[in-house]
Structure formats: structure tokens, C-alpha cells
Amino acid sequence: MDITEMQDPLGVSAYSVFPIPLDKHNKKSVFYTKFLTPHKFALCLLIEFYAQHATAPSYSTSFLDIILEYFDSSNSLPQSLIDLHNVTTNLPSTIDGYSIYDLLHERLWSLHSYEDIHEIFMSLGSYITNLYEPDEEPPSHMLFSPSSILSIFLRKCVVEYEQLSFEQGVEFFKSFLEYRSPSMNFRKDGVEYCKVNVRHELLGLASNQTLLQLAFGITPGCQATQDIEGLIQLQIQHMQRYGCFLPDEMKRKLHDILEAEGNHLNTSYHFRFLNAWFKGDYQQSIENLCRYFDHVMHSNERVSYQYALLNLSILQADFGCDKEALRAIEDTINTARESGDIACLNFALAWMYEFKRSQLPSSKDKNPEEENHILEHLAINSQGAQIPVLQSTVHLMQAQHYLDNGNNLVGVFSNLAKSFALQCYSESFHCFSRYMDLTQEIWYRLGCFSLCFNYISLYQNSFVQEASIIDLVKSYMNKARRLFENGNWPDVSSTLQMAKMESERSFQSVHFYGREKCFLYLDKALNEKNYKTAIFLLKSLNGFRHSKESLFKTHYYTLKLDISLGNLSQSIDAIESLLEDDVNLTVEWKLKLMLLKVDVYVNTNVLHRAIFELLNIIEISSSSFLRLYLLEALCLLCLIGNLDCIKSTELLDSLIPEIIASGNKALMALSFYAYTSIQISNYDKLKPSRIFITKLLDNAYDGYKSCYMRDMQQRIALLKIRFLKQIKDNQASRYTEQYYREFFMLNE
Amino acid sequence: MMLEEGLYTQQKIVETRSGLWNCIKECSERGLVYSVRWAAEMLAGLKSPNTLDAPFSSTPTAELEEDTTTTNERILEFKEETTYTLAKAYFDCKEFERAAYTLQHCKSSKSLFLRLYSKYLSGEKKIEEEADTVMSSIYPASSASRELYSISETLDSVQKQGNQDPYLLYLSGIINRRRKQYAKAIDFLLSCVRKTPYFWSAWQELSLCLDSPEVLASVIRRLSNDHVMTKVFIVYASHELHQINSSVYEKLAEVDSLFPTSRHLRIQRALLAYDTRDFDDAEELFEVILKSDPYRLDDMDTYSNILFVLERKSKLGFLAQVASTIDKFRPETCSIIGNYYSLLSEHEKAVTYFKRAIRLNRNYLAAWTLMGHEYVELKNTHAAIESYRLAVDVNRKDYRAWYGLGQTYEVLDMHFYALYYFQRATALRPYDQRMWQALGNCYEKIQRPQEAIKAYKRALLGSPINSSILMRLGNLYEELQDLDTASAMYKECIRSEEEGDMTPETIKARMWLAKRELNQKNYRQAEMYVSEILNGDLELEEAKALMRELRSRMEHTPN
């Protein structure tokens, strides 16, 4: 080993016996402390410089900024000497030609053995006012007030150091050597800094390789559990907030810390639980959830069993174990009641209500009274519990409830307004996504496309950084659905692309995206009469987990397919049986099914029944503020109702502006179709201009085309040809040819 | 003549080698691991025989010379081989009672030894278990002492039947020592070492039975003078009794010629240097030992004591790091770390480590004494006294503990009480100046100047001149109005000072002498003393005033 005498800044004869650390090949071990790390020790030295007026006065503020920034664990800045070097190397000190880093370097390299570090720790107390004897002569250095952030930091370091056993102290010293080692390569004006690390008295013993290996053989890295915990907490917050697993790159960086053998932090289990959950690993997530709560309840009194149960039930529900989830939530409620935890009780009740609302229960479990009772209970209690998040959620739940029942528009708006006000008041926007969803939903129902779309865009533009993944994907899918209805398929594709990209961040959102995308394509396939694809998509829907709504959707599309395939009697029976389930059906779904019924009746030419159904739809939709359904029903009534042509025309005239505002292309085409159909049927009486009718028909055709509704396009084309023939227009033959080319040659 | 000498040495080497091998074999069979380790170390350090000079013999000798008793033993051992192997296996797994139970019907001396030794060790284990706190008594009254009695009875009956197995004798020696029957223990152990001279544990036990140099001398008289093991023992026991003289070094040199690379002897040399307070030499020797045997922890606590005294912080820290890497649960390691913390003025932490050392081995004497020192530093005199007392209980020959006790009582102003402890310390270290000085100080405090003078004079005997002792002597003579002797003492004190190194004592001596000369009107002499003071680094007002007075007197006195 080369032992070279070096210039020691302190003037003590000291030598370099590097390479220390000796083992470069072994996997680095980690020494865990609670708070103290070599980096924080280096910060202590910087504070010492500051106290000794070594920093240039004009740079004191920026110097303090660096210190404060670096010991705030929540900002997770890297804790390496290289980073410290980069920020302090340009800060001048009060000594000419020396930067703060130069001083720090000299100080760091003047520490040769464990006792040097020990002495520094022992001297740090002298910088704090009350540790200094008042009778003594005041020192020349600065004294920090005991409550100042710097002295708190110093005290924390010293207290932890004093609690270290000798073995731990040595490990800390060795980790300090490891921390310091990158500075061997630092240069000042192209010249190497000093590299002194062994005192003269040690030369004899340190020249023996075996002894040196025994003393400094394995130099571990040092990590403070508080820092790790802060980092994990940050990740947990990130995961909880966005509902997604950790990106692979970040996971790789965290891997060493989280997978380390010595790391038994409770939070790491919590982290693993969330990661497994969002990756869809049921077994691992249950395992880690239980492990987390087993450990945390031992060390943290605040966390109680009811929260373990609450988490478990959410997890069970998410993985489709509905019965288990219900049992767990019932246990949560009971435990929370017993322990008098009102907050947990209310959250559990709110969650149970939501769960029951979204699931299709077996008939014996169903008790709508109970659900209403829960909601009422929550509405009353959330007020008293003074938990704004819960209160706001309950308002949104009430708004949803009114939307489902569809008879209280005032209730919906007042609850939405209250929820928003509470969110603003408490500055907590946990349920903002849901608020925006409900708002766009209500405007959609009221047939105001621009407002609905604006709300969606507003949410996506301004809240995308804050929103959880599942909410964001939901929002994208809503947008795609609205665009689809608006006949804007190219934008639908691009929106789906974005949704796909976002959805890949969690298992739940991947499922949601896949399912909703299936529904969209299914809709399109049915419109296009592409039955093969439709059947395939319906089958593939079985691979997804379903909520109550998605189950209805599946039934709905199955029925639509059946009707398209001509299985009419079978379809009508199925619709009837579905409509009997009055409890689970929301008004909207009821109307959708009734419209299907109308379709069947029209197809079988039982027009009086169709008209009867339409009248029913009109009544329900008008009382439930479901404007789109009302408009559609009215258009259909005009089309098939054999009404007075003038009144029908007037009615449609008045409806068309609203229909256009609703942004629903199919509905708009239907209204044009109905209008032109009446006009053509009563041509002699109404004498519409040719150009007006053909223009309307062209618009209707384009509208259906943009919605891929091929049979309706065909119908419009036929109507146009018929009309042209009727008025003996010489263009008729050209259109006939075009029609033939469009619909028959393509099919061939 | 040279050839004869060479042949003699070769024969000695061969004999020693065969003796050590034999001992290794026998001790291994009996689970006496430390003796095996020692013998193996000595064997490794033994001078290589010159095979050319070795006497050649084609026939084995020893085996054929066995008497009938030995033959009977061999037959019995052969019969009991299976049972013995089983019991030995239990013994190796530290299931001592199980081993003893397995051997209950065995008759051979070897089996009997293992049975009784197992019982003894099991009793020791129980003592450890029963001692619930660190500071409790070392030998609690318990079933373990009954165990000792039953072992002793069995051994007595066997020995009455004429069984003189050396290992059983060794066991008798241990039992008697534990029952504080030292004379009997010495008899048994001497008989043992005569039969098996290379059995080191027996020598160690024998050394533990010695409480004074006189007893050591009487024991040596009963041993064969020219046997190499007697010499090794003399070196070891002298160190244990802290009675180092030139003959010990001679013996060590003699043994060294036979075992030139022995680690045990190297350590003995270092320990002797430590005992004679030649810390620099001791440090050097220990450093060489550590470098040649880096995983060694035995006696490294002594090395740490040396580093502590020399205030080699870094070295001590390095040693502590090495020791803690090798085995952090060895009493030696804890003691080293304790010393290191003590040097860093972390006395509470030091106490923690000394306590840990004691938990690991209740008979670990060094830790008791060092813990006492730490308690003194922490001003916890009661705990210090208890620690020192327990140290003395473990080993009555530990002068440091006696001395510590005396010092602690001095802190409590119990000078008369402290006297007893200092007397014990001086008895153990008759040539240690510090002990006599402390004794003298005590006498001074209890107003017994005559005894104090004797003690101080004894302190100066054979030791380097100490100015503070001379100063004290001067003071005492002054009190007794023997001003001439006092003056002589002060003058001696001034003479003792090194070149230009004026100490507070020598300044005081000069002041006293100057005043005396002034009173006797020897102004020139007085002026010389005062100007010496004023020429030094310290500026003393008193000296200046004296000088002024001197000048004025000189001015007013004609020639």
C-alpha cells in the first residue's frame, strides 16, 4: 500500500492510506439511522461556518437558503457531497480566495478518525444559547436561539449521535468516509484537493492490510429512516392522489431503499400495498395491507383496526370480491361505532352507500330504504362531524342520488353548489373530479353540449396535474363519448389515445379504459351494422369487471344487436324483464330501454304501441329533465305519429335549434329526417322548396354518416331519390346511381 | 562440548514437543479447550528440531512402560468409549447436566473427570443465571455451592482409593480454590502439574491461588527448577502478582530460546513491560503482536489500557473498531470500547460498555476496576466503591482496585478509612511510587507526619525523583521544625527539575529557600533563588515583592 504524506490543513502530520473504502466489488450495505446522515453532518459543518462568520456577509442569505433547502427532507433533494459541492463552490467565504466549499473540503478532510467526528458533535452544542453558561464570557461566534430552525437541526443531529452505540458510531464514521470519497476527484483551479485520512500514530497498525480491512473493510452507505419514510410517504401520497402505481423508472431508483434487508419501515408495507393494488396484484396487496396494519398498530396508537378494515373492504371491492367487501365494511362500521370513531364511521357509511349504488345486488340483499336511510344519516351527521371532505362528498352523493331519480333539478344544483363551496372553503379538492363529472353530466342531460364539453375541457386543462388517474381516464372517456355523439370520430380516436396513455398507470384505469372503449366501438359497430365485430366486442366485454351501470350497458347493447339481427320477440321480452327491475334502474336507463322498445315496435310496424311508448317517454323525460330523450321522443313522434303536418312542422321547427345546441349529430339528423319526411309526405300541401328539402336531407345524411349509422344513411338517400322522383327532378337518376354505388357496390 | 549441548537442547525440544502433543490429545478428549489452544500455540512457537542431531531410536519407549493402574484405566476407557463419546458430544454442545447424567455409571478416571467437570460447569452456569443484576455479588449463595460440595466429596473418596489422575487433581484444586482452601488447592495443583506439566489451566489455577510473593516463592521451591514450564509459570505468576524483577526477565529469556516464536511469550513480554510501566515498549510489543495476529482479542484490553494511558486516541479508536468487527460480544472488546469512550470523556457510555463486559463474564476483573474509575469520574463514589470492591472480590491481587478504593474514600474525606486500602495496594506493589505517595498523603491528612515522612521516603526508594514528594517532605519537616532537613528536601526538589522546566513545586521550594536565606541574612543566596524564579516564564507578584524586600535590605546593610 502506498502511504504518502500529505499537507494537512490543521498542521497535524497525517497520511493518506487510500483506497478506503477497500471493497469496491461487494454490494453496498446500508447503515440506517433515524435522522442523522453524513450529509446532515456536512450541513452541521456549514452551519458552524455560518456561526463562525466564515460566510461572506453579502452571501449569507443565499448560504442560508442552501442550508434550509437541504435539510428539509420533504423536498427530497439528493444528499450527496457532489450536490453540496455544486451549490457551495461559487459562494465566497470571508477568507480571500476561498469558497465555502474550499472551507468545507478542508474541514471534511481534517477528520481522520471517529473521535474527530465525536469532538465536532460535542462542540455543536456551544452554538445554541441556552446550552451556554450565562456566567461565562460570551464566545466570539454566533449563538442561535434554542427555537431557531438551525439550532433545532443541530440538536436533532447531536441527540441522535449521542444515542448511537459504538458500533453504530463507527458505522456512521465509515459511511461518512463513503460520503466523502467522491470529493477525491474534486479539483480547485485544476489542482487536486488534499486527501489526508490517517493520523501518524496509526501508520503502524494501518499498514497491515488485514487490520485495515477489519477496521474499514466495508464502508456502508447511510440512510436516515426519517428521510426514507419521507420519501415513501411522498410516494404514497402520490399514489393515493393519482391512484396509480409507481412508474418503473422511479421504482428502480427506489428499489434499493425499499428492498433493502434492513428496511422494515411500516410505510414501506403501505407503499407495497398500494403498488400491488394499483398493479392489480390481489394477493400481494392483501398481504402487504395486513402486514402494514399488523406493524403500524403496534407502533402507532392513532391507527386503529377500523381503518385496516376500511382499507380491506375497499381493496376487496376493487378486486370484485363484493361479499367480502360488504362484510369488511360492516365490520368497519361496527368497530368504528364501538370505538366511537365518528369520522371513520361516516367514511365507512359513505363508502358503503357508494359501493351499494355501484353494484348490482342479489334481490334478497336489496333494500332501497336502507340506502336512503344511510344517505339521510350521512347528510345529518357530516354536518356535525365538521369534516369538510366528507360533507362535500355527501353533497355530491346527494346530487348523484337526485340525478339517478331525475326529479329534483334544484336539489342537484344546490348540492353541487354546496359541495363546491365547501371545497373552496376547506381548500381541499379531493372530490373536485366528481363534482366536475356531475356538472358536465347535468348539462349533458339538459342538452347543452357546449357547456358540458366546456366543463370537460376545463377539468382536463386545469386539473390534469392534480386529478387521480381513474378520474382523468373517466373524463377522457366522457369526452370521447360526447365527441362520438357529436359525430367527430377523428377526435374520438385521439382522445382515446390520450386516455390509453394515462390509463396504463394503474390496473383499475386499464380495466375502465378497456371496457369503455369496447362500448364505444360496440356502438359504432352496431351503427355500421358490422355484426361480426359487435359480437366479438360483446364477448370481449366479459373479460372486464363490471359495475351496475356497465352491466346495464352490456345488456343494452346485446338487445340492440338482437334487434338489429331481427330477434325482435326475444328482445322485447328481455326489455320487459329489465324494465321490471324498477329499483336498480335509473330513469335514464329506463328511457333508453323504452326507446329500444319503440324501435322494435317501429320495426314490427306496431305503430300505435310505439306511439304509446313515445308518449310515456315524453312524460318521464320531461319530468326528469332528460332533455335529449325528450327531444328524440318528440322527433320520433313527429316521424311516426301521423300528426297534423303543420303542427308537426311547427313543433320540429321549434325543437331543431335546441337539438342543434345539444350537439347530438344522430338526433339532429333524426330531426331533419322527420322534418323532411313530413314535408315530402305533405308536399302538395306544404310546398317546400326543393333546395331546402335536399339541403336538409343532405345534412341529415351527413349527420348519420358522421355517426356511422348506415341504415339511416340509406333511408335518407332513398327518401331523397323518392323526393326527386316525386318532383320529377332530372337529378334523380344521378342520385340513384350514386345510391347504388354507395350502398350496394361497397357491400359487394 | 558444543555437540553435547546441542544434543541436550535437541532432546529437550523433542521432549517438549511430545509433552505438548500429549497434553493436546488428553485435553482435547476432556474438553479442556483453552489448555489445548495454549499448548497448540506453544507448539507452533517451539524451536524446530535439528533432525540431524536428534537421537535415533527405532523402537517406541513410553507405551511399554505403563504400570498396571494405567493399563486398567485403558481397559475401562475402552469399555466406556461409546458412552464417553456420547457424553462428550453433549458436553461440546454445552449440555453439561446431560453429559454428567450420561456418565453416571462410568468408572474410568477420564469419564469421572468429564462427569464432575460437567457438573462444575453447570454450577457455574447457574451462578451466571442467578446473578440478575450486574452489580450483584459474584458468588451468590445457591445450589451451585452445594454442587461444589458434592463434587468435592466424590473427588475425596476417589482420591482416598488411591486415584491420582492429574485431571481429577486439577478439579480438586479448582474446587478447593473456590472454597477458599488455598493451601489444599495448591497441593492438589502442584501434584497435577508434576504429572502433566504442559497442562496450562492447572498452572493458571495455581497462579490464582497465590496471593503474595512469599507464597509464590514457596510454590516455586516445590517445583522442579529446570523444567521449562516452571519458568513459564514464574513469568506468568510474577505478572499476575505484579512482582517484576530481573530474574523474571531472565526466566523469560531462557524460555524464549526454546520457544522463539511463541505468541504467549511475546504477550508475556508485553505484559511485563506494562507492569513495569514501560508503556512505550509495551505499546510497541503489542503493536507487533497485533500485526502478526490481527484477529487476536486476548490481552488486547491491556493494550487498550496502554493506549489509554498514552492518550493515543486514534490508535485506541482503530483497535476498538477492529475488535468490534471481530467479535463485539467479547468482554475484551467491550473493555477496549469502554476505554476509548473514557478517553473521549464519555464516561457514561464507558460504564455501559464495562457493564456489558461484566455481563459477558462476571469474573472479568479489568472491567470492574475500570468501571470503578469511570464512576469516580462521574462523581458517583458509592457505585465506584462497589465496583472496586467487586473487583477485589474477583482478584485480591488487583492493586488498582485497592488503590481506587483508597482514592474514592479520600474523595469522601475518609482518610483514616482509606489508609487500609492504600496499605493493601502498597503491599501488592511495594515498588510503585504512586501507592506510597497516596499512603503518605493519607498519613499527612490524619496528622501523622512521622508515618507520612516514612511513606514518602519509601515512595522515593528505587523510583525516579519526584519533585512533589520532595516538596511534601519539605513541608512535613518544616511542620516538625526540622528546618535543616526541610531545606535539604527543598534543595533536592530544585535539583530534580529538568533543564529550565520550572514547576510550581520548584518555585515554591525556591521561595521557601529564599525566605529562609533572607531570614538568615544570606542575601546573595536569597537573591539567587528569587532571580531564578523571575527569570522563568511565570511572573510572580510574591517573588517580585520578595525581590524588592531583598534589595531594600541589601541596600540598608553595609556590605
Image: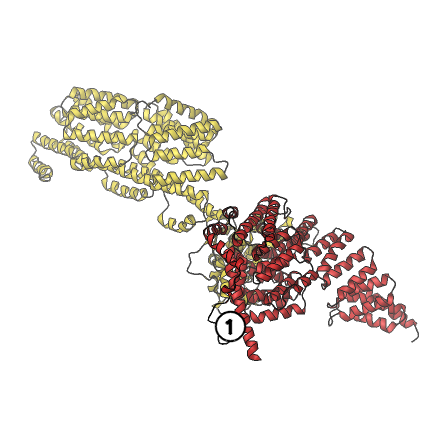
Chain colours: A yellow, B red
Q: Residue furthest right?
A: B558
User: Callout 1: helix, strand or loop?
Assistant: loop
Q: Residue furthest bottom?
A: B1
Above-or-below relation of A569 to B494: above
The spot of residue A17 in percent (x, y) is: 51, 66
Above-or-below relation of B145 to A433: below
Drawn side of residue A747 relative to residue B513, left or right? left
* Residue A270 visible from this viewpoint: yes
Displayed quadrant of residue B559? bottom right
The spot of residue B350 in percent (x, y) is: 61, 53
Q: Amino acid at mark 1?
A: Pro
Q: Residue at x 40, y 51 (%)?
A: A253
Above-or-below relation of A307 to B505: above
The spot of residue A401 in percent (x, y) is: 35, 26
Q: Mark 1, residues whose alpha carbon is within 10 Å: few (<14), some, or many (≥20)?
A: some
* Residue A11 visible from this viewpoint: no
The spot of residue A25 in percent (x, y) is: 41, 60
> A733 and A275: which one is in front?
A275
Chain letter for mark 1: B
Q: Residue furthest front?
A: B68
Displayed quadrant of residue A640? top left
The quarter of the rendered structure image containing the C terminus of chain A is top left
> B108 and B333: which one is in front?
B108
Drawn side of residue A478 relative to residue B125, left or right? left
Q: Which residue is mark 1?
A: B49
